[in-house]
Image (tube, grey):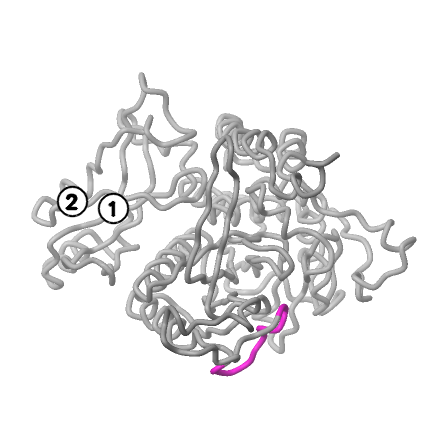
């Protein structure tokens, strides 16, 4: 879309406002709303000034001026605002030079795509993320010096089989709900979120997003919608829109959606499997005659992912809560192994009939990740594997969850905590700095933000500790 097309869109839609949006280092979508009459060619060309010191991990207050640069090709009509509003995703630039700001996640994604082209390995990187989420009817939590607690509830929760709802709703307990690990794929009335998910998906279609399916997931109250793959930066934009739609449609239903990796114990957590492929000259680079019909480049790409998996964890699994999902026994991909079809390793090669569909799936990321940084980091690890011909070793076609202890001990794992992941990223990050895609200052700022979360988590007593230790 050209600037002229964008301005015509504003006029044709009779928009009252233009919402310009950007993503902070932690992956949270931010916005400012501009009166549509003020958005002209000069506005698009010059961008919008804002205070970068108010965004955690960015500028200090003495150097706070920053500029949002509109990507008019990303424009869409917001489906939730009462007043007609056109939304546009932005990158962030230094106001004096208009050079991209090196800590802007969207700018990092764009640099990763440019680096792929300059490498000569390929010209297009496709991502197909599968982000799961939970939906609850009631969410309560408290964090103070004398009280730490949380409580979630949902009418379709597996724990509500004997709850008496009559006093609150006047309706009895119907008894139809999925059990623990029993949510994949029953029809209604066990799956009672069909219409809500359908509205989420149809809303995405109206926004121009490419979608294909929706369904209940394995855990109680867990769901997934299907996004069709796209190029790196645009697909990260799509994930931000995906989260935005899910949060707001759930809110309209009087419910609450969360992308926390492990919002409750005893059931499966939430992942974001990322399907990836590289193309060159309109041909799939990953199709070949090696294992699972992969090319040698694809195997090297897997080698890079497995080698750098622990450092990647700091970006692909960026919360303390992420590591409550990455534990054995809940279909969690904790082992640094790869296989065709087998879902128990952290890298899988999905079955496909066509060479064009040949891809590699990283199964350890989760949707708490900043999608721009997540996809860019995965690409950089894979490219490092190709450049340095990193052998991934033999495939693991056994059920890794059922291996004898001596065999299991021989397979390396991903990180077990955010602390470990940050320490690994501090040691292993040179692959991210290639082509100045990531910068040392950016990584230092990001790691600093994440250490704050680790300290907050580690310094706070947990209710389970009272149960285990109070009477010691």
- Is label 2 in a helix, a strand or a loop? strand
- Residue shown at 72% from the left, 36% from the top: 471
Please check the rendered image and state whether residue 181 is part of the magenta-colored stretch, yes or no. yes
Q: Nearer the viewer, residue 159 or 306?
A: 159
Q: Which mark is residue 20?
A: 1
Query: What is the secondary structure assignment of the residue under circle 1?
Result: strand
Q: Nearer the viewer, residue 192 or 184?
A: 192
Main SS, magenta region, reads: loop
**Quarter-of-image position of residue 25:** top left
Q: In this view, which residue lies farthest toward the top?
A: 62
Q: Quadrant of the N terminus?
A: bottom left
CA gap, disc 2 to disc 1? 8 Å
The part of the image, by quadrant, that contains residue 320 is top right
Question: In this rendering, does residue 366 appear at all?
Answer: yes
Q: Are marks 2 and 1 in contact (CB under 8 Å)?
A: yes
Over which residues does the magenta segment extend? 180-189
Count of numbered circles on the image: 2
Which quadrant holds the C terminus? top right
Residue 235 horizontal/vertical position (percent): 43, 57
Residue linked to disc 2: 34
Residue at (12%, 57%) from the top-left corner?
A: 15
Q: Earlier in the sequence, mark 2 or mark 1?
A: 1
């Amino acid at each position: 879309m050209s600037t002229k097309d964008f301005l015509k869109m504003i006029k044709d839609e009779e928009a009252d406002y233009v919402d310009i949006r950007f993503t902070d280092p932690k992956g949270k979508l931010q916005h400012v709303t501009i009166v549509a009459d003020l958005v002209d060619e000069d506005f698009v060309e010059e961008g919008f000034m804002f205070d970068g010191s108010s965004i955690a991990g960015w500028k200090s207050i003495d150097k706070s001026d920053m500029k949002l640069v509109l990507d008019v090709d990303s424009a869409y009509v917001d489906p939730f605002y009462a007043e007609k509003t056109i939304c546009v995703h932005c990158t962030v630039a230094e106001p004096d030079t208009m050079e991209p700001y090196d800590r802007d996640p969207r700018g990092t994604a764009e640099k990763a795509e440019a680096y792929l082209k300059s490498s000569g390995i390929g010209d297009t990187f496709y991502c197909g993320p599968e982000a799961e989420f939970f939906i609850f009817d009631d969410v309560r939590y408290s964090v103070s010096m004398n009280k730490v607690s949380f409580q979630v509830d949902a009418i379709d929760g597996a724990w509500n089989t004997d709850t008496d709802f009559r006093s609150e709703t006047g309706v009895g307990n119907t008894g139809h709900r999925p059990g623990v690990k029993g949510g994949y794929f029953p029809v209604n009335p066990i799956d009672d979120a069909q219409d809500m998910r359908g509205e989420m998906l149809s809303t995405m279609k109206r926004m121009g997003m490419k979608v294909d399916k929706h369904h209940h997931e394995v855990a109680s109250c867990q769901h997934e919608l299907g996004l069709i793959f796209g190029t790196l930066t645009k697909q990260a934009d799509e994930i931000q829109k995906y989260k935005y739609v899910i949060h707001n449609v759930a809110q309209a239903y009087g419910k609450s959606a969360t992308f926390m990796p492990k919002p409750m114990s005893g059931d499966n957590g939430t992942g974001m499997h990322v399907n990836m492929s590289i193309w060159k000259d309109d041909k799939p680079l990953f199709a070949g005659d090696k294992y699972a019909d992969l090319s040698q480049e694809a195997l090297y790409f897997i080698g890079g992912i497995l080698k750098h998996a622990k450092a990647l964890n700091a970006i692909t699994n960026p919360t303390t809560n992420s590591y409550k999902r990455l534990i054995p026994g809940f279909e969690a991909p904790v082992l640094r192994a790869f296989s065709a079809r087998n879902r128990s390793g952290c890298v899988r090669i999905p079955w496909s009939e066509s060479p064009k569909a040949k891809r590699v799936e990283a199964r350890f990321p989760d949707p708490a990740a900043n999608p721009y940084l997540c996809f860019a980091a995965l690409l950089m690890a894979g490219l490092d594997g190709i450049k340095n011909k990193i052998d991934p070793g033999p495939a693991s076609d056994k059920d890794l969850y059922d291996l004898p202890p001596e065999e299991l001990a021989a397979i390396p794992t991903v990180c077990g905590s955010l602390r470990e992941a940050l320490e690994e990223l501090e040691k292993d990050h040179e692959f991210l700095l290639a082509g100045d895609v990531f910068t040392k200052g950016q990584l230092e700022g990001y790691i600093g933000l994440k250490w704050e979360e680790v300290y907050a988590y580690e310094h706070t007593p947990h209710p389970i500790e009272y149960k285990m230790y109070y009477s010691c």
